Image (spheres, grey):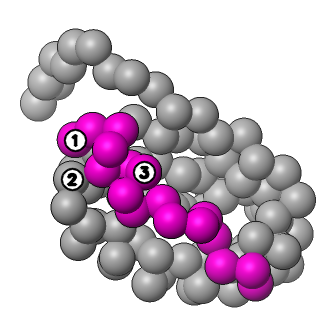
Amino acid sequence: MVAGHIVVEPGDRDTYLAGCISVVRAARQANGCLDFAVSADPVEPGRVNVYERWQSRAAVEEFRGSGPSEELGAAISEVVVSEYEVVQVRNLS
């Protein structure tokens, strides 16, 4: 699982998120992707939440490639994203 947030200029967040649509679509179609979301934080205007769930580390690495495009990468002022190895899952629904 990969989760955390990035920070962009508040006025640029909608443009940044629009630029992520193709990445989200590609990730969701990638081999081993269980879930992938990039979304606006409802409280902090420049924060973009990141959530990814993959079948394996190999699937993440295969998709990752070189990271965000140059344009998307230039808009980011801070990255607080971590990878987690989930040992056990309990369904809450």
Rendered image quadrant of residue 33? bottom left
Front in this rendered view, residue 70 or 7? 70
Residue on which the image places disc 3: 61
Real-space Cα separation, disc 1 to disc 3, in angstroms: 11 Å
Front in this rendered view, residue 12 or 65? 65
Kindly identify the amino acid type of the residue bearing the numbered disc 3: Glu
Task: Judge from the rendering whether residue 69 lies leftward or rightward of residue 24; answer left or right.
Answer: right
Q: Residue furthest top?
A: 88
Front in this rendered view, residue 14 or 5? 5
Q: Is residue 77 magenta?
A: no
Considering the image in quadrants, where does the N terminus appear?
Answer: top left
Expressed as whole percent of the image width and height from the top left, the position of residue 4 reads 60, 41
Expressed as whole percent of the image width and height from the top left, the position of residue 86 reads 33, 21
Which residue is located at x 35 percent, y 67 percent?
Answer: 27
Choose the circle earlier in sequence order: 1 or 2. Answer: 2
Q: Which residues are magenta?
A: 55-71
Choose the circle earlier in sequence order: 2 or 3. Answer: 2
Q: State the mark number for residue 32.
A: 2
Residue 14 appears in the picture as rendered: no
